[in-house]
Image: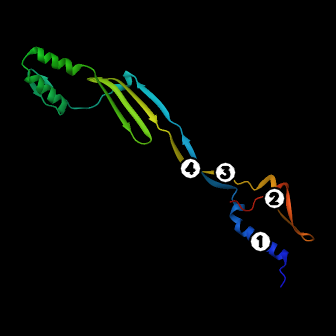
Amino acid sequence: MKIDKTLILSIVIVLLIILNIKQWSDPYKTETISVKVPEKKGSFKFSYDVLQFPIKQEDSIVYKDSIIYIKNKVNIKLAEDYKNLKSEFDRYKLFLNAIRIQNYSKTFEDSYFSATVTGGVQGEVQSMAFDYKIKSRRIKTDTEVKNYRFGIGPQVGMNYTLLGGFTPYIGVGLTYTLIRF
């Protein structure tokens, strides 16, 4: 039994066409790439005008050695401490301690972000700053790239002619890609 080389070549070409119907119809392909997101640092300073806004809040006050209770546990404690002190000097020290500027700092952090809020209060917010850092990391994302079919470059392969059969081929040529791997 003799196998016809033309028949085999025709079958191979038909199989390649069937296997690449989707690639022929899709001019783009999706590739997953890894992108490095660089570290970014920054800071915000808030002005005094921005910080002052009215907040409805209940409070407590001391009036003529009696405490008028309005729901605020910190001020209730301060008022009770003030009432329990007997000397005017101790009351004055408690007053000075209560009105001095209190500085604060709080840091919030997770694996992507770090932020620090700092400021000073003296009854009202006197200053506030927000410093942040977006941490460096690698993320993977899908992107569409052009699915080029034609290419020019070196070629190595087998050439088939009806008269000469298969012969080796080395050269430079134009290629149309059927299968990518």
**Is residue 110 depicted above or below 123 in this figure?**
below
Closer to viewer: mark 3 or mark 2 = 2
Amino acid type for the residue under numbered disc 4:
Thr
Q: CA distance from mark 4 to mark 1?
A: 36 Å
Residue at numbered disc 4 = 141
Amino acid type for the residue under numbered disc 1:
Val
Residue at numbered disc 2 = 156
Q: Which mark is residue 145?
A: 3
Which class describes the residues within 10 Å of circle 2: few (<14), some (14-19), or many (20+)? Answer: few
Colour scheme shown: rainbow
Which class describes the residues within 10 Å of circle 3: few (<14), some (14-19), or many (20+)? Answer: few
Picture quarter with the C terminus: bottom right
**Percent position (x, y) of residue 107?**
36, 34
Picture quarter with the N terminus: bottom right
Q: Secondary structure at mark 1?
A: helix
Q: CA distance from mark 4 to mark 2?
A: 35 Å
Residues marked 3 and 4 touching at CB (< 8 Å): no
Please tell me which of labels 4 and 1 falls first in the chain. Answer: 1
48 left or right of 152? Answer: left
Please tell me which of labels 3 and 2 falls first in the chain. Answer: 3
**Viewer-proximal residue, 40 or 62?**
40
Q: Which mark is residue 64?
A: none
Q: Secondary structure at mark 2?
A: strand
Q: CA distance from mark 2 to mark 1?
A: 19 Å
Which residue appears farthest toward the front when viewing the image? 168
Q: CA distance from mark 3 to mark 2?
A: 27 Å
Amino acid type for the residue under numbered disc 3:
Val
**Percent position (x, y) of residue 150?**
78, 55
Which residue appears farthest toward the top when viewing the image? 89
Residues marked 3 and 1 touching at CB (< 8 Å): no
Please tell me which of labels 3 and 1 falls first in the chain. Answer: 1
